């Protein structure tokens, strides 16, 4: 999956920065979307070619995550090394794993601009 497949659906990002973990290499970039009071989505991708390593979506009270299979083991190893629970999505939520990138693309397509500014989400 490529970052260009999800960018049009998510609108303007809230911010982007270099991803500091090493599990996805030296060109990993983090980007997130949402309003001041909420967090709708985030992605980590390779800024040189757009390959997505991870996409996380927060839809109401649910959190879903796609991990690129080729990089899943290195991500989980770094979580262990940092003593971080990879299933913890914050605020009492756990991630539901989504293995099919087409499902994530479809879910991203359901996000609207109004959701980015809705503090109840």
Image (cartoon, helix red, strand yellow):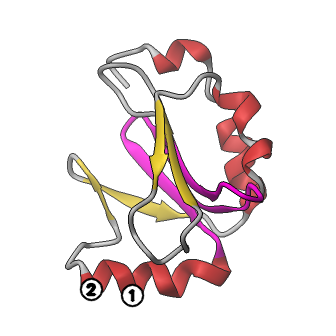
Would you say residue 64 sits in the magenta stretch?
Answer: yes
Please state the total of marks drawn on the protein image.
2
Left or right placement of residue 51 versus residue 121 in this view: right
Residue ID at (46%, 27%): 14
* Residue 15 against residue 64 in the figure, above or below: above
Between 52 and 120, the one lying in front of the other is 52
Return the x and y of residue 65 as percentages of the image width and height: 52, 59
Left or right placement of residue 4 versus residue 85 in this view: right
Return the x and y of residue 101 as percentages of the image width and height: 73, 60
Q: Secondary structure at mark 1?
A: helix
Would you say residue 40 sits in the magenta stretch?
Answer: no
Residue ID at (47%, 78%): 23
Left or right placement of residue 16 versus residue 109 in this view: left
Q: Which residues are magenta?
A: 41-68
Return the x and y of residue 46 as percentages of the image width and height: 65, 60
Neighbourhood count class around disc 2 (C-alpha, 10 Å): few under 14, some 14–19, many 20 upward: few
State which quarter of the image contains the C terminus: top left
Q: Are marks 2 and 1 in contact (CB under 8 Å)?
A: yes
In the drawing, what numbered circle is on residue 98? none
What residue sits right under mark 1 in the picture? 77
Return the x and y of residue 102 as percentages of the image width and height: 78, 55
In the drawing, what numbered circle is on residue 81? 2
Left or right placement of residue 68 versus residue 102 in this view: left
């Amino acid at each position: 999956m490529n970052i260009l497949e999800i960018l049009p659906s998510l609108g303007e990002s809230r911010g982007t920065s270099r991803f500091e973990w090493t599990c996805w290499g030296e060109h990993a970039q983090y980007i997130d979307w949402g309003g001041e009071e909420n967090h709708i989505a985030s992605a980590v991708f390779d800024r040189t070619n757009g390959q997505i390593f991870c996409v996380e979506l927060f839809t109401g009270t649910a959190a879903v995550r796609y991990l690129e299979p080729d990089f899943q083991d290195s991500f989980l190893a770094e979580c262990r090394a940092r003593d971080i629970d990879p299933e913890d999505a914050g605020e009492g939520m756990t991630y539901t794993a989504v293995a099919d990138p087409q499902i994530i693309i479809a879910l991203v397509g359901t996000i609207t601009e109004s959701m980015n500014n809705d503090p109840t989400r």
